[in-house]
Amino acid sequence: MINDTLRLGRRRFFWSAGLLSFVTQSYWPRLLAASPRAGFSSAKNVYTRLGIRPLINAAGTYTTLSACLVPAEVREAMEEAAQVHVSIPELHDAVGKRIAQLVGVEAALVTSGAAGSLTLGTAACVAGKDQERIKNLPDLQGIKDQVVIQKTHRFGYDHAVRAVGVKLVEVEGSEQMRNALGARTAMMLFLNSADPKGSVKRAEFVEIGKKAGVPTMIDAAADVPPASRLGEYNKMGFDLVCFSGGKGLQGPQCSGLLLGRKDLIEAAYLNGSPHSDTIGRTAKVGKEEIVGLLTAVELFLKRDHKAQLKEWEQQVDFIVKTASSIPGVTKSEMFMPEIANEVPHARIQWDPKVLPLKRKDVAARLRDGEPRIEVRPSSEEDPVLELAVWMLQPKEYRIVARRIREVLVAS
């Protein structure tokens, strides 16, 4: 039933405190008390030696929280890659071809995160393979220097596009978009997570770009799972697609993917490392990250995603039911973001008259407590807490449930 609910419109799913029986309320604290108290060793490690306290990541794939933990197979592949020298051009070529084949796209390039993909993709559309233009970036004198973007799609990471020297031309609506395209237009940029905000949706955006002969690039950094997304936007018609390697793919945190047209991918490679006099030289990826991301993609595509989804649902279910039994909690529900991080999350809401706390108060107590727990960012002043389970290690969801209960009950 939960699977169906999530798939059919991703309707929110919740239990209220009034629906829990006395037996359930009596049983739950005992189950929580029996839960393991640490998801990681408290022994001295590289972080504690530096005076840094490790954390349980109930927030998600945020870079500031070190995003994902890579699987053992990825770590082993990176360690193996680190033990011998190799030609980086040959490695980029071989891995790019392999990833392109795996996801069903024309060409692929391993980059330094989705931001690196944005920079290299923009450089490819502006300078192409012309060595003089490549060397002169970000000086765009005499060449196309504009990127068209919907006003509602402006975002912090478009700095990675502007770094190439281009000017972002903001538009609203399809008519303005068509009129903005001209001799100076190098590219059109689409932020996938902003699709609900913009009036020009993906399909129409691509169609406008195709008719005008202007390359289109989409930032889909956090848009896997589902696995189908890896090839979906290229098949839709986008010329370039950017993904983060260190989020849902569980590859190296400093890796990313640029997927798309072969000529543009080749140009993107020429605009970056290992080539010295390029705008993307600073966005270097080493042999370890290149091999690590390939391994992560292979693992991701082989994974039983239905089983993984069911496991996450069960973990959210546990947290939701635990919170529902707390006096003062008015709603405890499962939800799934519409775009980006499309996995089950938990949302807990309480009556501030009964529990005189704001989101920032609960988050601070979880962060300062033992073990240290980080939750999903949201409005600091509201009596609402959101959290993710997909970056948790085995059994940590029980620790999170116990700590939330402790914090709310103690208020």
Image: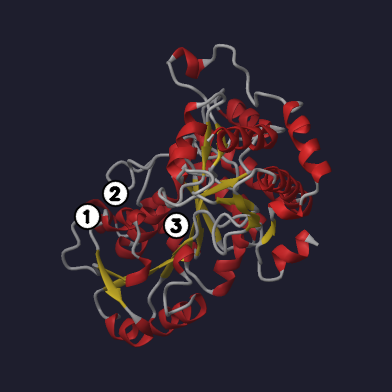
Could you say whether the residue bearing mark 3 is in a helix, strand or loop?
A: helix
Say which label, 3 or 2, has the lower sequence index. 3
Could you say whether the residue bearing mark 1 is in a helix, strand or loop?
A: loop
Say which label, 1 or 2, has the lower sequence index. 1
Alpha carbon separation for disc pair 3 and 2: 15 Å
At x 59%, y 36%, the residue is 409
Where is mark 2, residue-wise? Answer: 279
Where is mark 1, residue-wise? Answer: 138
- Circle 3 or circle 2, nearest the eye: 2
**Measured from the top left, where is residue 2 in percent x and y?**
76, 59
At x 44%, y 57%, the residue is 266
Neighbours of disc 2 within 10 Å: few (<14), some (14-19), many (20+): many
Where is mark 3, residue-wise? Answer: 266
Instruction: Out of 336 and 409, give the one closest to the viewer.
Output: 409
Q: Are marks 1 and 2 in contact (CB under 8 Å)?
A: yes
In the current view of this chain or complex, which residue is farthest to the front? 353
Q: Are marks 1 and 3 in contact (CB under 8 Å)?
A: no
